[in-house]
Amino acid sequence: MSTEPEEYKIPELVMGVRNFAALKACQQHADAVYFSLDKLSLRSRAQEITTEKLASFIDEIHAQGLKGYLAVNSVIYPDNLNELDEVLEYAASAEVDAVIAWDPAAITKASEKDLRVHISTQANVSNQVTAEFYRSLGASRIVLARELNLEQIREIKEDTKIELEAFVHGAMCQAISGRCYLSAYLLGKSGNCGECSQPCRWEWSLHSDNGAVVDIDGKYLMSAKDLCMIEYIPELVEAGIDAFKVEGRLRNPGYTATVSESYRKAISMYSEGILDRDKVLPLKEKMALEYNRGFSTGFYFGYPGPDSLAFDFDMNASPVKREAVGIVTNYYPKQSAAAVKLLEKGLDNGDRIIIEGNTTYLEQDVTSIVHDGKTVLSAERGNEIGLEVEDIVRKNDRVFRINK
């Protein structure tokens, strides 16, 4: 691997987050975060950040020394135009650092409000002429099409002055730059309007014209593996990419923490000239313990083959699983304890748990369980218990057990 990083700009690390908890999980590692509101986004199911909460969210991002980019990247229909004006007005008032958009209406209206514009990967920018076209409209950055290889990215960089951002980690979509209609056709839920039900992740059967069904033994024929480029940081940097983007606005804060820390370590080692595969492979192995569909290099080294498809598993290839246990009903700061209702499962002393909410993320071992005023070694489903906790938790936070 190359050890001459001084010739190249070190890219910005941009993490996808869905709430305050995810922001907290990556704030020590990221340079910027991107996020969605509960409207006009391809991840509008991430509903924790609303227009009313936007200003406080941006204030917290800036307080951590990060930049905040707001995705406004859904299809804009005529009846969305007033809503678009409202969202962009809130964005300008909150002083977001950029709006991620591809629809000319969103680009035009954002520019009118003096908002910086990053062109979404939904625009499928695949060459330097198109990149320069968007620069002529006032855009400051392009999020490149995911279907480009490294040589193509290098050529684009040589012939444009606009910043280039590229996805380096996270879920891959079967459709060109995410422009998919399968969910809309099958379920009436448009992926281009933030409602994708991910039918490409289902089990599918092959049917011939004569009615015969091909036995494929429950394989997931269309499910792509996740992108993972942590082993190829030098190649990415030396192609001229200005920002590394990590997908994951719907994933849990544990994923966000692990992935952001891993890429930050790899980028830092590269900048110090000490990165090699012996150092980076443990980081990849650690990320494989978080939610993932297996890893591939996408289109960076050519068209993906069968090895880039997750034929054999449903959604999550990680050996580590999260199991819902219950919900926090109260928190007692003086006792460093939480009351927990065990709605789904019981708990044992020594279990590894995660407590998670809109502003909470805590991973710890169960060290003390109190039931009916007595310290016990285990508690059953349906019990309300007291748990010693290592940080602040909040009412209605969810409790999960980690199973390995």
Image (spheres, grey):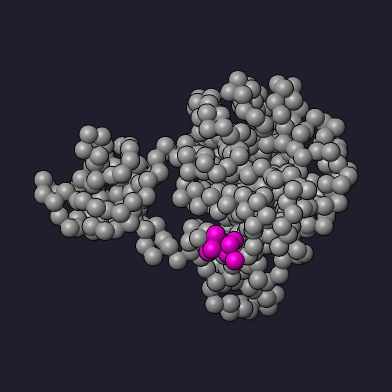
Is the magenta region chiefly helix, strand or loop?
helix
Q: Nearer the viewer, residue 374 or 64?
A: 64
Residue 12: percent from left, percent from top:
66, 42
Q: Which of 342 and 68 is in front in this view?
A: 68
Residue at 50% across, 26% down: 56
**Does residue 90 appear anywhere in the picture?**
no
Residue 12 horizontal side relative to residue 265, left or right: right
Q: In this view, does 378 lie above or below 221?
A: above
Residue at 67% across, 50% down: 271
Residue 358: percent from left, percent from top:
42, 38
Q: In which quarter of the image is residue 334?
A: top left
Residue at 71% across, 29% down: 116
Q: Which of 277 and 344 is in front in this view?
A: 277
Residue at 55% across, 71% down: 312
Q: In this view, does 299 lie above or below 385?
A: below
Residue 253: say if magenta: no
Residue 14: percent from left, percent from top:
62, 43
Instruction: Give the quadrant of the C terminus.
Output: bottom left
Residue 128 horizontal side relative to residue 394, left or right: right
Please provide the residue range marked out in magenta. 278-285
Instruction: Give the quadrant of the N terminus.
Output: bottom right
